[in-house]
Amino acid sequence: MLDEFKFTLKRMRKSPLSIVGIVIVSFFVVIAILAPVLAPPVDPRDPYAIFHDGYGPTPRPPGSPILDSFILSTGWKVHYFGTAEGQLDIYYGCIWGARTAFRIGVLVVAISLVAGLVLGSISGYFGGVIDEILMRFTDIILAFPGLILAMALVIALPRLWPIEFGVIGIVAASFIVPMVIGFFYPKLRGKRAVILGFAIVVAFAIPYVYVLGSPPIYTIALDLNSLDKVLIALALVGWPGYTRVIRGEILRIKQEDYVEAARAIGASDIRIIVRHILPNAIYPVVIMASLDIGSTVLLAAALSFLGIGSPLGYSDWGQMISYARNWVWTGFENPWQFWYTFIIPGVFIFIFVLGWNLLGDAFRDILDPTLRRK
Amino acid sequence: MSVLLNIRRLRKYYPIFGGVLRRKLAEVKAIDGVNLKMYKGECFGLVGESGCGKTTLGKTTIRLLDPTAGSIYFEAPDDVMEEIDKLENSNEDSARLKELQKKYDLAKYRGANLRTLRRKMQIVYQDPTTSLNPRMLVKDIVSEPLVTQGLAKGQDRKKRAIEILDKVGLTEKHLYRYPHEFSGGQRQRIAVARALVTNPEFVVLDEPTSSVDVSMRAQLLNLFQDLQKDLNLSYLFVSHDLSVVECIAHRVAVMYLGKIVELAQTEDLYKNPLHPYAQALLSSIPIPDPAVKGRRAMLSGEVPSPVNPPSGCRFHARCAKAMQICSQQEPELIDVGNGHMVACHAIR
Amino acid sequence: MADDILSIDDLRLNFYTYEGVVEALDGVKLSLRKGETLGIVGETGCGKSVTGLSVLVIVPPPGKIEGGKIFLKVKGKDIDLLGQRQAILRRIRGEYISLIFQDPRSALNPVYTAGDQIIEVLVHHRRKELIRRALERIDKEIASGKAGFLTKYYKKIYQKWLESPRALSLQILSKIPIARRYNRILKDEAKKEATKMLRIMRIPDPERVVDMYPHELSGGMAQRVVIAIALACSPEVLIADEPTTNLDVTVQLQILNLIRELKEEFSSSVIYVTHDMGVVAEMCDRVAVMYAGSVVESAGVLDIFKRPLHPYTRALLESIPRPGTPFKSIEGTVPSLINPPSGCRFHNRCRFAMDICAKTKPEIAEVEKDHFVQCYLHHSLGE
């Protein structure tokens, strides 16, 4: 294990671009962690809301002092990067925007990745009808252009999402109860356990209805921030890609001798998938994921630019550029006088995505098994 | 010697699907009616060229592949076998037969029985580079059978792993390395260790020396022989390399296109092959002696496809001694003395 | 030597990999005489395949030839292949030296028929001859009065092609879709020649095989097609890189016999690379044994088998499994060539190793008539 790690580090050292990638990503990680220190929040309950001193429409250049009444209450003195329309501080937005970027990028990719792993493994390993159905499903989603589908989903997702908790509870119970039963009573594993579990849950529900007069269904309403909607939409758009890649890798690895050898010693299907196939199948996905983090942030920025991303005044780079729409080019005299409204957040996005892309390239070069042992 | 495996009328067909509706177009008859007995403690050699079905036979015997028809009786005592013979010949639908088969016939094993079977029958693959998971430590590779069979836990596992590595000539310090850090011969030993860790009785060796250098082959052959004596193993040694099989097997069977054409003690077969195919096969082994040169190729053409095997004796189209009857009727495997069995109309 | 058609002198080759520099060939010295079959024997990693590739100067990166000379006798003169321009090497490959690969399935391009691949070689090297034949055919057609009206134009085109193959008008014409039909006559002639080659390879029904794709061919047939491609232009030197390793043993015998017969018919000299001593005994006149990047012994085939001098050769011959006798193997493993052992690379596995063996590498010297060894047991330093 240690040898592998050392080898990986050595390879990384030989490729200067990968070092640049690592440095950039680490830089942003540090900014994100130290956000409360670098840009102390004005409203501690909602740190992501960018503060604004006044309501004037014209952006002010970097270095402009903050209006006196504001300084007294918050401790801020200067707009380091200037202000955007509505006097929102660009510096604040950029620093806390790093956190938002990580949230969007990492969360969306993580959800897509996990969903893709599970569904892709089932599809690739078991094949047959499940495979066909899942693949048609992914085909449907992949048939839509990603950005457009994301837009449609963001708009379609309701703000208040009532989730039938009880229904989820019953569904979950009918998975968990059989597993618990199967654990304690090995003879009852498999189909029998599922039927028994289902029967127990239904048996539980019936007297409940009898006594209380209504089925045990609770409704919670999820209040979705528009940023949350973006997250959900992007995850829904992203999972088919991972599913297909994993499925392809599994199909390839399934035929290797060591998988058959694992069957020859009596390993169960799950063990084969988790212990033998996935560790070998994971490489293209890791590369895809790191490249995807960058592109997800870009996609979210695009959605914000179109106005359906994060809420107003949220510290999100894409949002800030969206705000700068009217100030990009202002007449023939002094056309770029408000450059700081879009260039600065733009630079942040650019370097963030560049860092992840370089990191993804670095992973690909390092983890490419054919280049390893020649 | 006691009979370990008694294979009867074993068939393995692979369907070929095609067309829009994915119907079965044809079948690849990989094994087409094989009858075989293997004894405990012997090394049984199985030779043939590509497409003859020897690897399929090896894998089907240990149920890595599911047989299409036929029976594989494992460790059935003689009196039980006699009873089964009687019941089969009587052609009745007997519950007693079914009961005996459920116990002894590997072809009928399912589920938990099958998993327990894996302890007793194991396989060593041809290419150790692909048969070992490149992302697993040697320690995990070798002790995995103990995990899946639930045979040992924790420290016991590690102890057993070290024990078995020692038997194949590796040491404790090899435990924490990856397969790619070893040479081909050593990797093959790791594969052997993995096969032996559950104390099996029967091991299928599927061309274990083909991917290894010539100078290493001797080491591996020594290892196989020592382990056989030490652990009282029975081997099925599948190979296309006839010179290696001559050195290590006690009895050898020659397969052609899914059927066994000749079976004899090793010495008998190599000195006096009777079936025309066996004769051609044995005469084409290159001999490392420059004084012996210029052997004529006795066979023309290549092995036909197992999808549509020729009628009657499968070899008749390429056989120099083919007669009228050869294209009409398949010859039976007959004992011509001293356990030497041949399936040929020309041998009487 | 006078009748050497190919001689390799002090060839050095390195592979520059991520793990370090692999010193694959460390001063290989070999010679191939006209009309003989030279066997190169060794185990995996000894450098025998790479030596074959070096002769054709097609070693893939990260491999790089670091030194040495390879002399080929072309039209009576010795030229150093390692110093030639690509254009000259392209003419030599296929026409003077050919290579038969180990795996016929991967040596053939799966999207072209067998015939197309032979035609490719023929058209590249024997174009003039094919054009002349095409002209003869056109003339015959005109003479017999069955000429279509385009035939006269074809004749003019082909005559122009013969004199100035790179004429601009021809280059333009060959790109215009319908006009380039004139190519067909040439392709036809080439196809006839290809079918003839397949018949020489003892392939039954060559007219059918010429149109078959590689995946439709069996292993032995595919290998014959590869041999046909290699011999299409009657090369002087044929390098066969383990051509029968992946084939069944009965097919192997057929192919070995075929190569032996064709060697006579085409009067080529053959370098046969293999790891199988039985094949060596069958096929070769002289043998060179390689270990870890250099030739440790080379002699006539009878001498190698009956009186092996180098300890490695002896150990190799002893380790061939024989029934009845206990199996002997060579201790240790093939060393990694990233940090090769000092001095003689075999010294840490050699029963007879002496102090000097670890310090300096022995030279290869002729200790008996036509029997070269690289070992201090048989000659001291400087002999």
Image: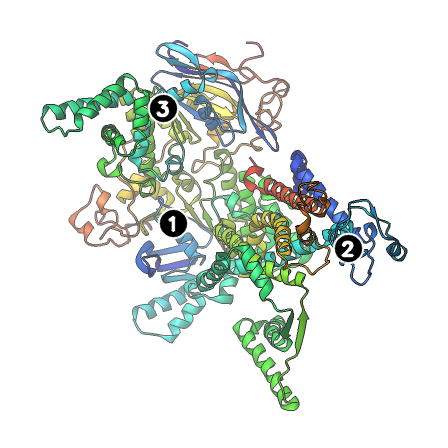
User: In the image, which is nearer the foreground, mark 2 or mark 3?
Assistant: 2
User: In the image, which is nearer the foreground, mark 2 or mark 1?
Assistant: 2
C376 over A362 or under it: above or below: above
What residue is disc 2 on? Answer: A56
What residue is disc 1 on? Answer: B54
Residue type at tag 2:
Gly
Q: x%, y% of residue A67?
A: 85, 53
C-alpha distance separating marks 2 and 3: 80 Å
C-alpha distance separating marks 2 and 1: 86 Å
Identified at 17% across, 27% down, the residue is C151
**Quadrant into which the C terminus of chain C falls:** top right
Give the chain of mark 2. Answer: A
- Figure label count: 3
Q: x%, y% of residue B239?
A: 41, 44
Identified at 59% across, 18% down, the residue is C361
Give the chain of mark 3. Answer: C
SS at badge 1: helix
Are the numbered discs 2 and 3 placed on the same chain, yes or no? no
